[in-house]
Image (spheres, grey):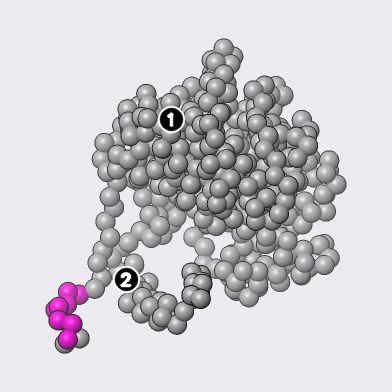
């Protein structure tokens, strides 16, 4: 009988190949300074290399006074509107805001009541998946990671679209609205398939209800009993608004624009963005925050013991604790220094939710880490700017309070960010016309080729 191959086995051959690759592909870090290479497309002050123009979103972290950059509390704008004002607007009127925000991102203006009603009707119309798609695609060979399941579903939808390759603005708009409407089902059904086939849980598939908003339907479809409170739906809706866009420079949106610039189809573009968002340095960071706090609560038995918390954080930075990455997840941002406006908004509502959920002690632990971590990071690392909690810091706690499974944290980010991705794809198609192609400096000398018997 032939031995079954273990395709995940790291053999001695693979180890040898890895050693060779590392030895020959490693770049001396000093060369980045020598050739003035902007690693991560950011300069030494953390300012991004200007690669394009956009009207969709703006991130502000400093004011310029007499030619000097002065850090300020972070601001986020969608088409010129302050995100804080947008949130205050729909929250004060006790209504959901994600659909309105999606309209703003796609079309550049806030909708009237009539325009919003028609837009919602269009999204409802597009929520349906192709016949048997759930059975034939999502429930077959389910992935252990919902983001991979989502990417596969997106690429498979290409096969169901007779105009998949058409990149006219009208067709891409149609595809975008369908993608925005379908993402909740693709993610949640992918999660249910995972739980059933990989963890032997009961399988239940709830279809979305036309009268419910996107946030309400996420909770409705995700929970076995379909029940949720008004506050839960409101906070999830606000979380989606805060995650809907963050300018053209974030990794997944830049991926969207880079791939769009090649002229490829919408499905390939959005699948690439999903792959980017999955990364633990981007959309997957909220899971890492949650995992880090689970580890912290296990190691520090008395949550009010700030000395023990400081030691835990110090060990994490020294690569001695948690995942030995040298990171305190949820702290710091590529742009913001004094504060991330999304985290600031989140914190206000997290505190209220913690009281409703009886999780005030856990909230206080998060506050302690938020206060202590910047001091420790500042002492241990040479930072060019301040460090503050980012949106991932509190979003993980929010999702935990909403009883959302860890496996859905990043997919919910995707359900929100698809609105921004589609807006940036359309803007790229309208205005750029050039393929994005940065330069890389070669740092190895030319060598003479030797025939195989002389090597």
Mark yes or no: residue 402 visible.
yes
In the figure, is residue 155 to the left or right of 243?
left
Q: Is residue 113 above or below residue 391?
A: above
Q: Which mark is residue 175?
A: 1
* Image coordinates for residue 212, horizontal then vertical, percent: 67, 25
Q: Is residue 111 above or below residue 389?
A: above
Badge 2: few (under 14), some or many (20 or more) residues near its Cα, within 10 Å?
Answer: few
Q: Which mark is residue 31?
A: 2
Badge 1: few (under 14), some or many (20 or more) residues near its Cα, within 10 Å?
Answer: many
Q: Earlier in the sequence, mark 2 or mark 1?
A: 2
Q: Which mark is residue 432?
A: none
Residue mark closest to the camera, 2 vs 1: 1
**CB atoms of marks 2 and 1 within 8 Å:** no
* Image coordinates for residue 428, horizontal then vertical, percent: 35, 35
* Image coordinates for residue 268, horizontal then vertical, percent: 39, 43
Residue name at image x 42 percent, y 47 percent: 272
Q: Is residue 426 above or below residue 444?
A: above
Mark yes or no: residue 414 visible.
no
């Amino acid at each position: 009988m032939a031995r079954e191959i273990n395709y995940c086995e790291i053999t001695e051959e693979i180890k040898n190949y890895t050693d060779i690759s590392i030895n020959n592909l490693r770049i001396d870090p000093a060369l980045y300074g020598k050739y003035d290479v902007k690693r991560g497309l950011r300069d030494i002050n953390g300012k991004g290399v200007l690669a394009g123009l956009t009207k969709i979103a703006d991130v502000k972290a400093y004011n310029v006074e007499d030619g000097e950059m002065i850090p300020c509390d972070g601001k986020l704008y969608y088409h010129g509107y302050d995100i804080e004002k947008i949130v205050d607007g729909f929250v004060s009127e006790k209504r959901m805001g994600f659909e309105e925000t999606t309209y703003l991102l796609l079309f550049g203006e806030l909708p009237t009541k009539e325009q919003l009603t028609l837009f919602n009707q269009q999204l409802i119309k597009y929520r349906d998946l192709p016949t048997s798609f759930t059975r034939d695609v999502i429930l077959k060979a389910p992935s252990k990671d919902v983001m991979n399941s989502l990417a596969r579903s997106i690429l498979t939808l290409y096969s169901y679209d007779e105009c998949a390759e058409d990149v006219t603005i009208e067709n891409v708009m149609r595809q975008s609205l369908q993608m925005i409407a379908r993402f909740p089902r693709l993610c949640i059904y992918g999660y249910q398939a995972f739980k059933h086939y990989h963890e032997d849980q009961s399988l239940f598939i709830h279809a979305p209800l036309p009268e419910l908003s996107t946030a309400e339907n996420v909770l409705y479809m995700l929970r076995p009993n379909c029940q949720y409170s008004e506050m839960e739906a409101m906070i999830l809706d606000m979380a989606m608004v805060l995650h809907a866009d963050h300018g053209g420079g974030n990794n997944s949106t830049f991926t969207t624009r880079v791939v769009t610039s090649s002229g490829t189809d919408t499905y390939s573009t959005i699948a690439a963005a999903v792959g980017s968002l999955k990364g633990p340095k981007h959309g997957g960071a909220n899971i890492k925050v949650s995992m880090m706090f689970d580890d912290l609560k296990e190691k520090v038995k008395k949550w009010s013991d700030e000395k023990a918390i400081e030691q835990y954080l110090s060990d994490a930075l020294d690569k001695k604790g948690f995942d030995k990455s040298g990171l305190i997840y949820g702290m710091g941002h590529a742009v913001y220094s004094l504060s991330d406006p999304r985290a600031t908004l989140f914190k206000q509502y997290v505190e209220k939710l913690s009281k409703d959920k009886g999780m005030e002690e856990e909230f206080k632990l998060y506050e302690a880490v938020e206060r202590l971590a910047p001091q420790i990071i500042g002492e241990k690392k040479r930072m060019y700017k301040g460090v503050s909690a980012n949106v991932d810091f509190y979003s993980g706690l929010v999702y935990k309070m909403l009883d959302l499974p860890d496996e859905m944290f990043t997919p919910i980010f995707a359900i929100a960010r698809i609105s921004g991705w589609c807006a940036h794809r359309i803007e790229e198609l309208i205005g750029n016309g050039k393929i994005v192609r940065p330069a890389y400096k070669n740092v190895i000398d030319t060598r003479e080729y030797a025939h195989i018997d002389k090597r």
